């Protein structure tokens, strides 16, 4: 929570089983108050709808906006991709709630018949990166299928196209859609073919590396590197491959001291701090 030092509120997203018998599950977000080593007053603030049979493509990234509302990414569940284009479910969506789970009064689909009121944007696949710049710009990245990973600037009420448009194909090689663009559907500011499997993302504002200030850093699982994306406002203008000697990099984060933290993926996973030579 942005006011953690005062209210001690912590938010967790996870896959929650409905029951052992049904083998159905959902994306759930809870909040609780952290006191010493205990999480107290735990409350569910979001349950994705409907239940799913798959254990993949949850999204589950969260980020607070400047107005105190919370964005939550909810993936397409892998087997439910067509539902990303309809507003009666949470598959392939970004949702926006208040910090207690209630619905903000200015969400874009509040007055749309049949739409779930939490929905903020739609037409996404598996959204695993989410950052918000100081000027309020929301950057999001998501896994494509075989090719077609995307970096998007997300705005409320917009349709990001999946699966009606895509730069990728099915894992079998079959065509998902013949279209890469359609009227009324947003284009990514960057896309990758072949896939890089983007995982974490941070907006660097640390000061230790002045030349990186305001750049996006995206951890990539398939090539095992980090992509530095230089921006001009809401446009991606240059990509640089960095830190490709550590294997699969699951997460990248800016530390308070201005260093960059990399988390590698696997049985021998490490936390690696990148700092300036003194």
Image (cartoon, rainbow, N blue to C red):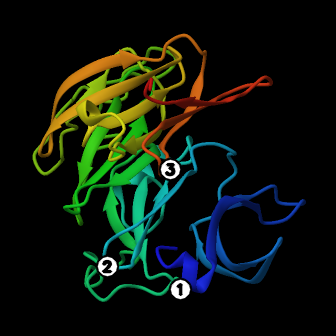
The label number, if any, that marks residue 262 in the structure image: none
Q: What element carries label 3?
A: loop
Q: Is residue 2 visible?
A: yes
Q: How far apart are marks 1 and 3 (CA)?
A: 22 Å
Give the residue at x 36% y 16%.
Answer: 241
Residue 100 numbered mark, or none: 1
| The quadrant where residue 248 appears | top right
Cα distance in 3D space between marks 1 and 2: 14 Å
Q: Position of residue 214 (x, y in %)?
A: 24, 43
Neighbourhood count class around disc 3 (C-alpha, 10 Å): few under 14, some 14–19, many 20 upward: many
- Observer-nearest of 9 and 156: 9
Crowd around label 1: few <14 · some 14–19 · many ≥20 (10 Å): some
Q: What element carries label 1?
A: loop
**Element type at marker 2?**
loop
Q: Residue furthest right?
A: 20
Residue 218 rendering spot, x and y as whole percentages: 41, 33
Q: How far apart are marks 2 and 3 (CA)?
A: 24 Å
Residue beneath the point at 41% across and 39% down: 142
Q: Disc 2 marks which residue?
A: 67
Q: Which of 112 and 243 is in front in this view?
A: 243
Q: Name the residue under label 3.
A: 75
Residue 8 is left or right of residue 68, and the answer is right
Asked whether the viewer can see residue 165, the reply is no
Residue 249 is situated, as x and y percent measured from the top left of the image, at 57, 26
């Amino acid at each position: 929570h942005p006011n953690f030092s005062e209210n001690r509120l912590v938010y967790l997203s996870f896959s929650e089983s409905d029951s052992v018998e049904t083998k159905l599950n959902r994306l759930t977000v809870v909040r609780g108050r952290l006191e010493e080593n205990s999480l107290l007053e735990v409350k569910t603030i979001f349950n994705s709808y409907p239940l799913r049979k798959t254990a993949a493509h949850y999204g589950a990234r969260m980020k607070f906006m400047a107005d105190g509302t919370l964005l939550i990414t909810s993936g397409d569940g892998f087997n439910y991709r067509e539902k990303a284009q309809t507003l009666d479910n949470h598959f392939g969506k970004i949702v926006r709630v208040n910090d207690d789970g209630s619905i903000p009064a200015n969400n874009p689909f509040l007055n749309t018949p049949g739409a779930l009121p939490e929905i903020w944007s739609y037409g996404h696949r598996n959204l695993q990166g989410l950052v918000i710049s100081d000027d309020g710009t929301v950057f999001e990245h998501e896994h494509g299928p075989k090719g077609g990973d995307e970096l998007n600037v997300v705005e409320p009420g917009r349709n990001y196209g999946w699966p009606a448009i895509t730069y990728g194909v099915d894992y079998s090689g079959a065509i998902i859609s013949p279209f890469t663009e359609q009227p009324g559907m947003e284009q990514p500011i960057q896309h990758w073919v072949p896939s890089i499997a983007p995982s974490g993302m941070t907006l660097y504002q640390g000061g230790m590396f002045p030349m990186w200030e305001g750049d996006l850093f995206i951890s990539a699982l398939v090539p095992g590197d980090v992509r530095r994306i230089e921006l001009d406002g809401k446009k991606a203008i240059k990509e640089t491959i960095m830190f490709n000697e550590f294997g699969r990099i699951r997460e990248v984060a800016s530390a308070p001291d201005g260093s960059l933290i990399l988390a590698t993926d696997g049985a021998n996973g490490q936390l690696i701090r990148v700092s300036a030579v003194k």
